[in-house]
Amino acid sequence: MKRYMVIESLEQLRAISDALRLEMITMLTKDAYTGKQLAGMLSLSPSKVHYHLKELEQQGFVRVVRTEEKNGIVQKFYRSVAFDFKVSEDLLPSLREDTLLQQEVMLNHLRTSITRLYNAPDESFLLFAEEEKRPPLYAFNGEVKAPRDEIKAWIKKYHALLAELNEMEERHLQRIRAGEAEDTGEVFYFVGVGFMTHEQIYVADDESLPEGFVHADDVTVRKMGRRKTEYDPGN
């Protein structure tokens, strides 16, 4: 499977601007399935799933990777051709006022993250275990009231940090190939969405912790509090 596929036509855009089709592409990124298998996992009729599969295949998003004969019937197993989709700049004029595609893509990220969270092993969430047993883990959401240009500048910095993760992965893969590191089979999954909205719900009249508590110093448990001691400032 390739990483990238470039969407080059309006027909492809229309084909992928659908929540069900995006979900099917995500499932076919993980493994190859028949239309009947997908229908069972999605609790939909096989005819409906086959219709959408044909549309996705026609527009180049999925392909048949193998066939198997069962009881005289040839079963087709489909797989996504890529898992990262880029839109050609030739289509940008057609997307200037379009919001549906991006909303569906972001929703699909969130739906996928919920599935992967439930499928992860229990030890992935040992946030409050002893330090040596804690896995890499974070979860947060929030609101920032700031000018758009400053938020855009921050997003650029965030993308630079993501590039560091890619470099980190490449170094590790090189060490595995060289026999210098063990392949544990683990990956660090993360998801992020951010957008402007007029709905503000995180508003506090009092930002302080209850009397007798201070914020813990450990960034992995920064939501925790601990009781003040004689060594804390102000005591």
Image (cartoon, grey):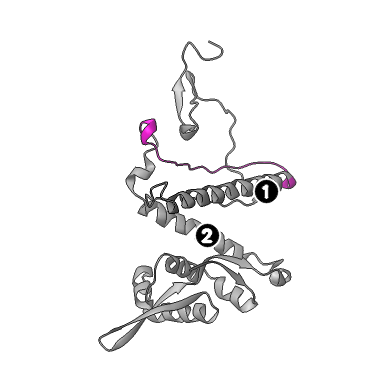
Image location (x, y in percent) of residue 133: 36, 36
Image location (x, y in percent) of residue 35: 38, 77
Per the picture, the main secondary structure of the magenta-coloured stretch is loop
Image location (x, y in percent) of residue 90: 71, 72
* View extreme (bottom): residue: 72
Amino acid found under the numbered disc labelled 1: Lys
Q: Which residue is mark 1?
A: 156
Question: What secondary structure is found at the residue carrying circle 2?
Answer: helix
Q: Residues within 10 Å of mark 2 (few under 14, many from 20)?
A: some
> How far, Cα to Cα, is label 1 from label 2?
22 Å
Question: What secondary structure is found at the residue carrying circle 1?
Answer: helix
The span shown in magenta is 129-149
Please identify the quarter of the rendering in which residue 15 is found. Answer: bottom right
Residue at 30% from the left image edge and 87% from the top image edge: 73
Q: Which residue is mark 2?
A: 107
Please identify the quarter of the rendering in which residue 200 is found. Answer: top right
Q: Nearer the viewer, mark 1 or mark 2?
A: 1
* View extreme (front): residue: 178
Q: Work out whether residue 36 or residue 65 is closer to the camera in this orientation and state it.
A: 65
Q: Are marks 1 and 2 in contact (CB under 8 Å)?
A: no
Is 146 situated above or below 59? Answer: above
- Mark identifier at residue 43: none
- Going from N to C along the chain, the mark reached first, 1 or 2, is 2
Residue at 50% from the left image edge and 50% from the top image edge: 169
Q: Work out whether residue 2 or residue 130 is closer to the camera in this orientation and state it.
A: 2
Is 8 situated above or below 218? Answer: below
